[in-house]
Amino acid sequence: MSSTETVSDTRPEEGGFSTRHALALVALLWTVALNPITGLLAGNAQAEVAIHFRTTQIAWFTLGAALIGTFLTPFAMKAAAMYGKKRVLVAITVLGLVGDVIAALATNYETLLVGRVFAGVYGPSAFIAYAMARDVFPKRLVGTASGVLAASVGLVGLGGPFLSAWLLDSNGFRAALWFIACSAAACLLLQLFCIPESPVRESDQRMDWIGGLLLGGGLTAVVYAIGEGSHWGWTSGKTLTWIGLGVLAVLAFIPYEARVAHPLLPLTLIRRRRVWTVFLATSVAAGAAYAVGTVTMILTLMPEIPHVSDGLGWSVTKSAVVSAPTSVLVIVIAALAGRFARRVDTRLLLAIGGALITTGYLVASQLHHNEWQFVVMGLIAGPGMGLVVSIMPIMVIQSVAPEEQALANGSQWLVQGVMQVVITQLVFSTMARDGVVAQGTQFYRDSGFTNAFLLVAGACAVGTLLVATIPKARPVDTVEAGQAA
């Protein structure tokens, strides 16, 4: 029996959410939310961590995990397709939990970075959770379930800042690190007991280790070089060597995959116009949208020091209150996106979302000095963010067959992750260009924040324009197993 036939026979009955489905949705929701909550807590803690450890390398506190996640994603998406999505989810969450504990126990910045980098092992968990939605829920509820999973970004954005405030303002960054570890442990328990194993399997049962090293290693080398470019010099031999080697590895991956018997990523999937255009447009737009969090967290939480730092010096609590309206909008729009996608072309929804985000960040580039200006930015960009994060998984569902879901979600997640890391590091470099180093800590000036917002807005605008290249697909609730557009 083929993978497609297996899905048709074992998918849940057509109907509403049963108790079993509700528990699975909660477990998947927690899995998708784990990375955002970790990123939010780490992002809010980075200003305190930088000052505590007196480091100018604070960018790697958040980017280190993204780096290892980028490297492991090709292997995780292949393993999920081969051995089962639940098995892979559990394995990477266990390993990531170990990293969280190391970070929480660290007494110096080097050990802290080791823990944070190791915690990036569970970075690929979100794309696997999105892929499981098609296997766990009736097809008429797949869009709704995907929208609910995407709404986790808004839920984290609403509750996360208040949680950060309670942890950081009262107990310091160490409490945030321990909470991250506890969240990963709770996620692991939910995965073990509430998520059924997906019946979908890929027929190829061999891991393409060489292909994974070429793709994951090549992308990681490029990301690492961009991360260090501001320190090495953008035209230095070291920077150009790392980027060149990374690009060569990725280029070598393409002809290698075309000849290997059991490819890591079937090139026939990527060559479909609907697939690669969806990957490109969603990844650029979402990567830029997520990267803006770096600007806002540094801007609001860094202290205001005349001639040294133009941060607003807010407490985490104040930042949470100001960002709450934005998070509510993200939740509402993301939760409704599944219904929107049944009636409106998903390309139009993605374009509207990208345009709103671009406009919001353009406004922020000029108005980012007090509370009401941040609220205005959020009222514009929040609905856009809700549309973008929720429409992405739905568009992937429209584009591929069930047995391709894990590979497709993984590929999109990989490209998006690379875009996010690259744009985030460019944001740090842009802010640092006009910044000041004082007592071993990097501080930033207002011109740097302005240019960083403009950079992110420009990247979002590019992603929005790329939507025009995407061919039309059938509505998500009409895509039967094995009948992808």
Image (cartoon, rainbow, N blue to C red):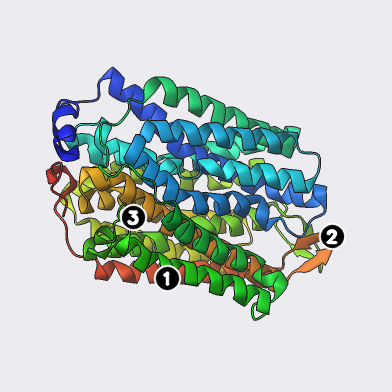
Q: Amino acid at mark 2?
A: Gly
Q: Amino acid at mark 1?
A: Leu
Q: Name the quadrant containing residue 165.
A: top right
Residue 307, horizontal then vertical, whole percent: 81, 69
Q: Quadrant of residue 328?
A: top left
The residue at which mark 2 appears reads as 440
Question: Rounded to the nearest whole Å, what is the CA distance between mark 3 and mark 2?
Answer: 44 Å
| Mark before the other along the chain sequence, 1 or 3 | 1
Foreground pick, 362 / 285: 285
Q: Disc 3 marks which residue?
A: 265
Q: Residues within 10 Å of mark 3 (few under 14, many from 20)?
A: many
The disc placed on residue 251 is: 1
Q: Residues within 10 Å of mark 2 (few under 14, many from 20)?
A: some
Q: Is residue 263 visible?
A: yes
Q: Can you name the residue that lies furthest to the bottom here?
A: 235
- SS category of the residue bearing label 2: loop
Q: Which quadrant of the figure contains the N terminus? A: top left
Q: Amino acid at mark 3?
A: Leu
> How far is disc 2 from disc 1 in space, using C-alphas?
40 Å
Where does the image place residue 38, in percent across and percent down from the top left? 57, 41
Question: Judging from the image, what secondary structure is the residue with disc 1 in?
Answer: helix
Residue 289 in sight here: no
Which quadrant does the C terminus fall into?
Answer: bottom left
Around disc 1, counting alpha carbons within 10 Å, would you say few (fewer than 14), some (14 to 19), or many (20 or more)? some
Q: Is residue 390 above or below residue 291?
A: above
How far is mark 1 from mark 3, CA to CA? 14 Å
| Relative to 403, 22 lies left or right | right
